[in-house]
Image (tube, coloured by chain):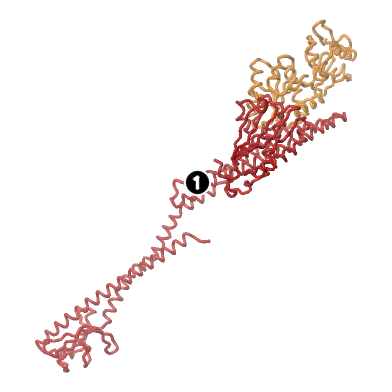
């Protein structure tokens, strides 16, 4: 899961990034509306965390522009404005959730996971493809009922693949999901992590679509 | 406690009684005098009639008869005496007259005869030595006067309770608007500071209600300021508290010692931010309080601008050094540059400007503080080599919580708001411009001449 944080306060933005990383959520962080639009136009994000009180262009105006452009990106407003009227106008402007500062990091992560699930049209925290199951609330995977031991990077890649069963997930998208972890992903490091995943899941479960990306294959349990 | 009602009642009653007693006394005196005149005239007339009668024939029989109350007469008829003297000889007498002359002289006189007071009239007759005396007992006069007195005073005495009641009622009615105003005031509270309706109250109470409404207006403003401060404070403190909470949670969940100590480091920064913000908010709130309280004495004073600038620069050398910014001051030699602003306020003022400069100047830049004398005015100039403020934004930067677009530094946007408030309060002019070489920001504060302000002049009155 890859999140874009729009937060003008440097200390808080950095803290959010670190805190979300502890929960296995990779986050990019920008400090104003224009860089946010730029980032959204260039890369894929699963979620947007939006502060309303930005210097210059306001968060609500940014949100309206995103929605006008037809984006269905789940948006969580994270703001100090706690008045009911603010919440109403935030949600009506197209936000999916609204959290008032100060907040609990655990709650923020849980809300982000819930938003991501709904964004995929799959409200249960457990995603299943054949006998492979991924519990996003626990960040744990099981194969045929047996727990799998995955590194955070392997989990992130598996999550991106299982969210799109029987479809090809592009290299760019997988790299974007992984970027939150390492900054720049080297060209061959994606292959390395996929290789590790295959070793743990079974070679036949992840197909390589040459020049495009990878695909998770459904293998029914025996 | 004095009661207006009781005081008015007693005063009105006292005046009423005094006036009536005076009126009664004067009218009694007048009517007594008139009665005396009338009776004197009657006496004289009686004397003439009797004299004429005695000329016709003797009245010895009548004179010898004791005077009795006549059934067809009048109570005031009796107690009349008559004598007719011819030389030393008593020719005729009538009534309770003694054997000696009723009076030693002719004309009107008062005589004491047989233990009673008599009014006597002596009429000289036609013959030489002939005198006719007629006397009337004074009791008639006294009775008439007593009768008049009683009848004049009785209705007044009877009307006394009614008058007391009427005065009581009138006073109570007159005081009713006061009770209404008291009720209106009684219904006021911190949440409901509605002005008292001053149109329907009597003109005498209007100054009171106007003064009260003025007080309420000031109270309302103070309360609004307090509420705004509380709302602003709680809103602005959310960000530093969020930072503190977030890093506390990161530290709590972290297993790596490096990550934990880094998080705690950031947490301390968050606490520092909150502390600074609270100090700024309190400064702002105190300045606002002063604005409402124009007679406040603590806001006055004189201080050396040069000294305040020097201290503010020294205090912020470390902060400037941490950002590799050169912070320098150019101060006049030996001239303290006294301005009509208290030292504590002056330090906040200069400090905020310097902090603002340090904050927005990129590392390696410089912030310069200068105190200059321009004719009779003193000028504080703070220039930085930062990005400056575009002309269009120069007014808005002084608004509370205003932060221009593209601003990389965190902050609540209170520093310059505080600066402007102080300037408004102390009559300091602010001018914003471009820094040296057309880059950065130049803030000029033009102070009012210290000599032109009397030490006892309430500076607060300058606020319009």
Give the image quarter of residue A96: top right
Q: On the image, numbered disc 1 is attached to which residue?
A: B196
Label 1 sits on a secondary structure element that is loop
| Place of residue B234 in the rendered image (x, y in percent of width and height, measured from the top left) | 68, 36
List the single residue furthest toward the top.
Answer: A210
Residue B424 shows in the view: no
List the single residue furthest toward the right.
Answer: A199
Q: Quadrant of the C terminus of chain A?
A: top right
| Place of residue A10 in the rendered image (x, y in percent of width and height, measured from the top left) | 75, 27
- Crowd around label 1: few <14 · some 14–19 · many ≥20 (10 Å): many
Chain A's colour? orange
For residue A21, side relative to residue B63 (left or right):
right
Residue B211 shows in the view: yes
Q: Which chain corresponds to the colour red?
A: B
Q: Nearer the viewer, residue B336 or B171?
A: B336
Q: Nearer the viewer, residue A132 or B397?
A: B397
For residue B93, side relative to residue B165 (left or right):
left
Instruction: Say if B43 sits above or below B8 in the image.
Output: below
């Amino acid at each position: 899961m890859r999140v874009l944080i729009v937060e003008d306060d440097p200390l808080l933005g950095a803290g959010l990034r670190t805190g979300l990383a502890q929960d296995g959520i990779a986050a990019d962080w920008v400090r104003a509306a224009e860089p946010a639009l730029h980032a959204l136009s260039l890369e894929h994000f699963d979620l947007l965390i939006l502060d309303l009180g930005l210097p210059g262009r306001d968060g609500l105006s940014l949100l309206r522009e995103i929605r006008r452009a037809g984006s269905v990106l789940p948006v969580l407003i994270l703001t100090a404005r706690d008045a009911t009227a603010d919440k109403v106008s935030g949600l009506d402007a197209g936000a999916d959730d609204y959290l008032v500062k100060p907040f609990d990091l655990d709650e923020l992560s849980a809300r982000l996971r819930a938003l991501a699930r709904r964004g995929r049209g799959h409200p249960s925290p457990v995603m299943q493809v054949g006998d492979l199951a991924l519990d996003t609330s626990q960040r744990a995977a099981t194969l045929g009922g047996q727990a799998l031991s995955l590194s955070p990077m392997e989990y992130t890649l598996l999550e991106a693949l299982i969210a799109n069963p029987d479809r090809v997930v592009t290299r760019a998208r997988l790299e974007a999901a992984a970027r939150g972890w390492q900054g720049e992903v080297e060209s061959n490091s994606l292959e390395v992590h996929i290789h590790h995943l295959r070793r743990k899941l079974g070679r036949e479960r992840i197909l390589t679509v040459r020049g495009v990306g990878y695909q998770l294959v459904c293998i029914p349990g025996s | 406690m004095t009661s207006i009602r009781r005081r008015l009642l007693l005063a009105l009653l006292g005046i009423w009684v005094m006036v009536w007693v005076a009126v009664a006394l004067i009218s009694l005196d007048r009517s007594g005098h008139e009665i005396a005149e009338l009776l004197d005239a009657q006496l004289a007339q009686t004397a003439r009639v009797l004299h004429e009668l005695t000329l016709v024939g003797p009245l010895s029989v009548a004179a010898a008869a004791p005077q009795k109350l006549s059934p067809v007469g009048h109570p005031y008829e009796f107690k009349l005496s008559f004598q007719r003297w011819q030389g030393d000889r008593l020719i005729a007498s009538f009534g309770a007259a003694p054997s000696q002359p009723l009076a030693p002289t002719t004309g009107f006189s008062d005589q004491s005869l047989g233990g009673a007071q008599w009014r006597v009239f002596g009429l000289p007759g036609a013959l030489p030595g002939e005198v006719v005396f007629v006397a009337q007992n004074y009791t008639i006069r006294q009775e008439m006067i007593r009768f008049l007195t009683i009848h004049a005073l009785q209705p007044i005495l009877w009307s006394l309770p009614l008058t007391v009641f009427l005065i009581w009622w009138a006073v109570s009615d007159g005081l009713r608007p006061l009770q209404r105003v008291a009720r209106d005031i009684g219904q006021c509270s911190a949440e409901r500071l509605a002005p008292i309706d001053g149109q329907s109250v009597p003109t005498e109470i209007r100054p009171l209600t106007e003064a009260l409404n003025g007080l309420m207006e000031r109270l309302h403003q103070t309360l609004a300021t307090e509420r705004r401060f509380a709302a602003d404070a709680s809103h602005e403190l959310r960000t530093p508290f969020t930072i503190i909470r977030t890093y506390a949670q990161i530290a709590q969940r972290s297993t790596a010692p490096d990550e934990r100590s880094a998080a705690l480091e950031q947490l301390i920064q968050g606490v520092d931010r909150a502390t600074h913000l609270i100090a700024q908010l309190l400064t702002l709130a105190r300045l606002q309080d002063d604005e409402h309280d124009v007679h406040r004495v603590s806001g006055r004073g004189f201080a050396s601008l040069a000294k305040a600038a020097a201290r503010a620069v020294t205090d912020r050398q470390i902060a400037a050094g941490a950002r590799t910014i050169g912070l320098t001051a150019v101060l006049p030699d030996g001239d303290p540059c006294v301005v009509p602003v208290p030292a504590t306020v002056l330090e906040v003022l200069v400090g905020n400007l310097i902090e603002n400069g340090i904050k927005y100047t990129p590392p390696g830049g410089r912030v310069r503080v200068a105190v200059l004398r321009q004719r009779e005015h003193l000028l504080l100039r703070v220039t930085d080599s930062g990005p400056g403020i575009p002309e269009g934004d120069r007014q808005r930067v002084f608004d509370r919580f205003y932060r221009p677009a593209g601003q990389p530094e965190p902050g609540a946007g209170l520093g310059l708001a505080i600066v402007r408030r102080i300037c408004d309060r102390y009559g300091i002019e602010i001018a914003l411009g471009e820094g040296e070489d057309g880059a950065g920001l130049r803030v000029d504060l033009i102070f009012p001449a210290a000599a032109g302000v009397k030490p006892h002049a309430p500076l607060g009155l300058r606020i319009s």
